[in-house]
Image: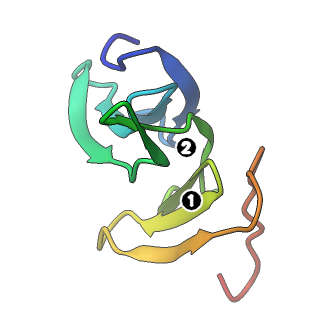
């Protein structure tokens, strides 16, 4: 997909097949794509991991996924994990961990 400076690091298609999320390799962006219209629907700017020579440095978005029903999605970059509700746009979880995240998964049960 065009639209990420430095390339796409991760991709997740919504269970409906109508939306997709992509995470940039180095541009610090998470993007929501409308696959039915073939265009960008929304972009989220991530927090830079550091500054180098006066320029923001971003970790690659190493993992993105949707919940089974597509009501929420999660992504990880560097030591950061966020889970966001689709309907409200509010973060359900937003944490920094002591070490780098390589992969994430969501486990759903009767209580959500």
Residue located beneath label 1 in the image: 69
Question: Residue 15 bears which disc, if any?
Answer: 2
Who's the residue at 21% across and 37% down the image?
A: 41
Who's the residue at 34% across and 25% down the image?
A: 35
Tag 1 and tag 2, C-beta contact below 8 Å: yes
Q: Quadrant of the N terminus?
A: top left
Residue at the bottom extreme, as displayed: 111
Q: Is residue 106 left or right of residue 93?
A: right
Q: Quadrant of the C terminus?
A: bottom right
When the figure is inspected, residue 32 is found, relative to residue 2, above or below; the finding is below
Q: Position of residue 93 (x, y in %)?
A: 54, 76
Q: Quadrant of residue 52?
A: top left
User: Of helix, strand and loop, which one carries label 1?
Assistant: loop
Q: Nearer the viewer, residue 94 or 19?
A: 94
Dot 1 surroundings within 10 Å: few (below 14), some, or many (20 or more)? few
Q: Nearer the viewer, residue 14 or 25?
A: 25
Q: CA distance from mark 1 to mark 2?
A: 7 Å
Q: Position of residue 109 (x, y in %)?
A: 76, 78
When the figure is inspected, residue 92 is found, relative to residue 28, above or below; the finding is below
């Amino acid at each position: 997909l065009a639209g990420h400076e430095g390339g796409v690091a991760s991709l997740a298609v919504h269970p409906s097949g109508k939306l997709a999320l992509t995470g940039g390799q180095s541009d610090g962006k998470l993007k929501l794509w409308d696959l039915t219209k073939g265009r960008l629907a929304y972009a989220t700017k991530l927090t830079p991991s550091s500054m180098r020579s006066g320029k923001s440095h971003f970790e690659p978005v190493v993992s993105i996924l949707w919940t089974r029903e597509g009501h929420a999605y999660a992504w990880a970059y560097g030591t950061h994990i966020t889970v966001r509700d689709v309907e409200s746009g509010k973060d359900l979880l937003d944490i920094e961990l002591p070490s780098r995240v390589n992969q994430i998964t969501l486990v759903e049960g009767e209580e959500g």
